[in-house]
Image (tube, rainbow, N blue to C red):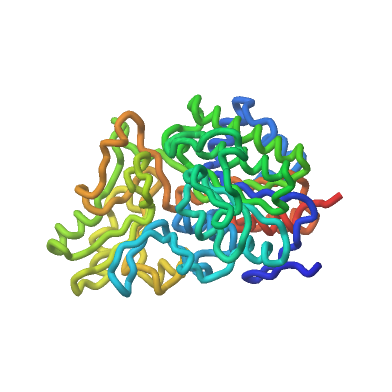
């Protein structure tokens, strides 16, 4: 059969069940901690029996752009999704980037399904489900809405019955484990030849790598990967972003409220700062990440804005629209006047009044979005061919994962 062509790549159709897992927020340090604690034997074994490496996530290191990159094999400059939340330059409206109409590329899931491959996708949050399910019919649902699935819209009428338990709480480790357990059942029932499983980063936002809760979660992830391999699957694992501690020594969030800073400098209402980490579930990060977009509302040159931001403690990079689009591979027409990133210990906000930090009480802020969270795991359950071992010596991107899982593992 002819391979599937998409965005300069050619993908072989799966010859055995193939599962790609986006382990949301799985910084490589979580696997390091799990290996030290002897908690993740299956993943540890990939160093000898498969492939164990690291790759670069797409920028900004947020959920939506990276999940879409994974299923298109391309950066945001190609597929058009550059954050979870955005400002529409044409209308001035602040919008969630969840509408499939915003996609500028078909997904591999859609093309495979259209070619007759049995495709399924399960996500933790429903915000991704509509984009991942765009252009194809099949099993595609979220843990979040597992109690409201219909055969017509989601390809399955009772997701809770499939997994054998009620839908999980949104703020729980089980939100991700439900996704994995659904995937296992779909493979057992031969309802998926190509399966995409996208998890939640609730655990990683709340717990450092060596904390008991994080170790337990990654042990549970490891057990489910082992179950998929036992069912005959090729399993590829990567992440949409890493995760870093963003708190001061006293435990308070290390945050720069950039809209406040710039409006004090240039006058009230001079700029609008958009935080593209924002989604409906901000309790664990307060809509604070390490990447923001700055839009001038008064006639102020981007260079003037940049000058006021550079040198602030905790700022990593300050790029104008053209430079940000080029360096981070972002769609120019959807980019802001200025992009600002924080370093590994710093998050950026809009105005202090917009961010509810009360929900962060009781744990240190851990978040993502910048270059400090770009390194992610890149794992394959089976050995690579000689050609792909050579390919892996170059720069790996997280959105290479379907290429490696479908084209790059030894078939014998």
Looking at the rendering, in which quadrant would you find the N terminus?
Answer: bottom right
- Give the percent coordinates (x, y) of residue 90: 32, 75
Q: Residue furthest right?
A: 412
- x 69%, y 70%: residue: 5
- Give the percent coordinates (x, y) of residue 75: 53, 64
- Give the percent coordinates (x, y) of residue 351: 22, 52
In the depicted structure, whether residue 237 falls above or below residue 107: above
Q: Is residue 105 left or right of residue 271?
A: right
- x 55%, y 70%: residue: 105
Q: Nearer the viewer, residue 300 or 43?
A: 43
- x 62%, y 27%: residue: 39
**Among the 4 quarters of the image, the one containing residue 3:** bottom right
In the depicted structure, whether residue 110 falls above or below residue 253: below
Q: Nearer the viewer, residue 386 or 225?
A: 225
Q: Is residue 347 left or right of residue 140?
A: left
- x 65%, y 66%: residue: 111
Q: Residue furthest left?
A: 267
């Amino acid at each position: 059969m002819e391979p599937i062509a998409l965005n300069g790549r050619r993908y072989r159709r799966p010859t055995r069940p193939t599962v790609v897992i986006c382990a949301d927020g799985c910084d490589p340090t979580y696997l390091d901690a799990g290996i030290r604690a002897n908690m993740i034997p299956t993943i540890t074994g990939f160093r000898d029996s498969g492939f164990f490496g690291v790759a670069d996530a797409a920028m900004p290191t947020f959920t939506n752009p990276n999940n879409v990159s994974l299923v298109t094999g391309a950066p945001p400059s190609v597929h058009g999704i550059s954050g979870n939340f955005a400002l529409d330059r044409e209308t001035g409206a602040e919008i969630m980037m969840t509408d499939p109409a915003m996609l500028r590329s078909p997904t591999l899931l859609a093309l495979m399904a259209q070619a007759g491959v049995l495709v399924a996708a399960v996500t933790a949050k429903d915000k991704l489900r509509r984009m991942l399910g765009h252009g194809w019919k099949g099993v595609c649902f979220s843990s979040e809405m597992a109690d409201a699935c219909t055969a017509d819209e989601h390809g399955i009428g009772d997701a809770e019955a499939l997994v054998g338990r009620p839908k999980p709480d949104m703020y729980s480790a089980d939100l991700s484990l439900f996704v994995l357990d659904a995937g296992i059942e779909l493979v057992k029932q031969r309802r998926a030849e190509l399966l995409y499983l996208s998890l939640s980063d609730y655990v990683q936002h709340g717990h450092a790598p060596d904390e008991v809760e994080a170790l337990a979660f990654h042990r549970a992830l490891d057990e489910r990967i082992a179950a998929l391999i036992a069912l005959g699957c090729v399993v590829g694992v990567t992440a949409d972003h890493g995760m870093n501690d963003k708190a001061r020594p006293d435990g308070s969030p290390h945050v720069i409220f950039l809209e406040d800073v710039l409006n004090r400098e240039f006058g009230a209402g001079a700029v609008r700062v958009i935080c593209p980490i924002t989604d409906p579930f901000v309790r664990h990060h307060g809509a604070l990440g390490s990447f923001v977009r700055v839009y001038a509302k008064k006639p102020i040159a981007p260079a003037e804005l940049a000058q006021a931001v550079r040198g602030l403690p905790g700022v990593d990079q300050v790029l104008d629209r053209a430079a940000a689009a080029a360096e981070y591979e972002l769609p120019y027409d959807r980019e802001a006047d200025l992009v600002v990133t924080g370093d590994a210990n710093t998050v950026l906000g809009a105005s202090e009044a917009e961010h509810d930090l009360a929900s962060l009480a009781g744990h240190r802020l851990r978040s993502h979005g910048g270059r400090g969270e770009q390194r992610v795991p890149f794992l394959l359950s089976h050995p690579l061919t000689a050609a792909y071992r050579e390919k892996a010596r170059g720069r790996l991107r997280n959105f290479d994962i379907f290429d490696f899982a479908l084209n790059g593992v030894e078939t014998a």
